[in-house]
Amino acid sequence: MSIGIVSAERAHFSQPLILRSGAVLPAFDLVYETYGTLNAAKSNAILVCHALSGHHHVAGRYAGQADSLGWWDNIVGPGRPLDTGRFFVVGVNNLGGCHGSTGPASINPQTGKPWGADFPVVTVEDWVVAQARLADYLGIDAWAAVVGGSLGGMQALQWSLSFPERVRHSLVIAAAPKLSAENIAFNEIARQAILTDPEFHGGHYYEHGVRPLRGLRLARMLGHITYLSDDQMAEKFGRRQRVGAGSYSFDVEFEIESYLRYQGDKFAGIFDANTYLRMTRALDYFDPALEYDGNLAAALAPARAGFLIIAFATDWRFSPARSREMVHALVHNGQAVAYAESNCAHGHDSFLMDDAYYHAVVTAYLRRIKL
Amino acid sequence: MSPSSARADFDVIASWMRPGERVLDLGCGDGSLLKRLIGERGVQGYGIELEDAGVLAAIAGGINVIQGDLEQGLTGFDDATFDHVVLSRTLQTVRHTERLLAEMLRVGREAVISFPNFAYWKNRMAVMNGRMPVSEDLPYEWFDTPNLRFFTLLDFEALCAKMELSIRERQVLDEAGRPVDEEANFLGSLAVYRLGRRLVG
């Protein structure tokens, strides 16, 4: 069942944070939510890392807001795979986000104006360091597990490398050890859509009282295609046309067009373009093997965590072959790893779906964890 | 299959493992062989399994299981990663037999293989009487068997010779799981082999 009514909390960190880029954040806030109860030994904490468009509101609803269900509610709650009867689950909005944690729309203390374009580019490694500050703040020495899908899975992997002693298990779902050229190409088109929007104003659009909605909408429409599978799109929309179609115009004629426009509009209404740029860049830069001449096994060798890696057969954005790269590197090193591949039909978005096999695998794996 | 017979080849396989050795079990099912090898022999084990139910059970048992299809070979696994690559009662279900054997000895120092002997005397009797054999070690009807290949000890050894694989050890068992020392291709229901690459030169 769902965890029920939840509320967000805010932690302030006044120690400067030195980022990978060399930039320094003098102080920052992270908003987070927790579900379940931290046990006396503080050994039952699970961190959920979010993907590109996610945030700290993972599960439950806000009081008085019926349609505020968390983005991964189907996996977190009493009796659910991330069982809040047993685990203390933490969701956090990443640095550079647009849901309350310090990000481009926050006020830059040096100027008194929104950071905008001046907010530094953040990386997966930076996020993990910031999340570690949150772990300190919550009194959690080591996570029972760090869990994430897609970009969140990359954080789960990075945690095991940045803080090997602080992660007992790492659940890396629908992820990849680095982006392919094709992945980066899609990100670049999304960024170009934003950067070339006349209302982008070099990233300082807040002070102009406008937002680059057209660019953000296009970016989301493009992204959305890569989250779905061809088969599922064919099944859901096919070539179905709207009533009154066939006007030989460029209005919405096919259902898929209507769907993409709806998704684009919805997203542009709630998300921040500067955050979108930074999230996609963090994806591009992620490559733990880079410092090891591309040798992924060498890069993963420092990890002490047990790994559960899950991929989806219909995911062409981060295909199962990308997950198997991580599996083979871990096997090469003799590290503990289990790998499951689900046939869930929803492409990359499968990781968000209530797929029986996938959820059973997560449940079975987490039940093994001794608290 | 009765439990005692089902584990007869496990006894042999377990006896060939030493503590700390790295083992890959192909078609590991729920991981029961690996669990035993880890618990009793102290090996470091991984398994490959195709079916969801097996993978799920193996994960629930804490086994390092990797979901995948043996017919795709062992692509992605580095050469000489394992001391033993085990294929227990599965070779007869594999289509790409030679490729899999070659792959086992690419990623492993030694291949450990068990399979039902089609030339076991009861199987011969069944065919003589006009029916396909159904036994402890060939427990399926012809129409529901997962087995694709029906071969004998002699057939297997001929393939090993053709592929220039050396047979390091062979243990043949009867239907009750007792060792068979003579007339193995006639009295043996199940065979367990350990194979290595033939040393060149």
Image (spheres, rainbow, N blue to C red):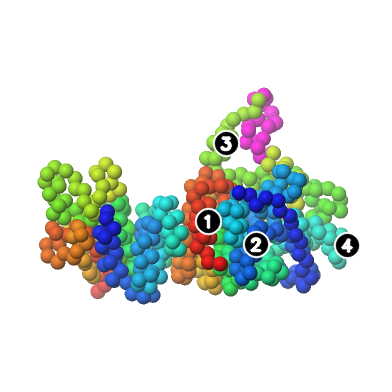
Residue B45 image offset from top left, x and y in percent = 40, 67
Give the Cα distance between marks 2 and 1: 20 Å
Taking the image as drawn, is residue B136 in sight? yes
**Callout 2: SS:** loop
Q: Amino acid at mark 2?
A: Thr
For the residues carrying marks 2 and 1, which lies nearer the camera in this image? 2
User: Disc 1 on helix, strand or loop?
Assistant: helix
Residue flagged by tag 3: what amino acid is it? Lys
Q: Residue sitting at 39 percent across and 57 percent down?
A: B30
> Mark 4 — residue?
A112
Residue displayed at 15% across by 47% down: B126
Cβ–Cβ below 8 Å for labels 3 and 4? Answer: no
Give amino acid for label 1: Val
* Dots 4 and 1 on the same chain: yes
Question: Could you tell me residue A22's position as x and y percent?
Answer: 73, 71
Residue picked out by circle 1: A362
Residue A216, image x and y in percent?
73, 47
Label 3 SS: helix
The stretch in magenta equals A244-261
Mark 1 / mark 3, whichever is N-terminal: 3
N-terminal label among 2 and 1? 2
User: Where residue A37 is drawn, which disc sits there?
Assistant: 2
Residue occupied by mark 3: A236
- Chain under numbered label 3: A
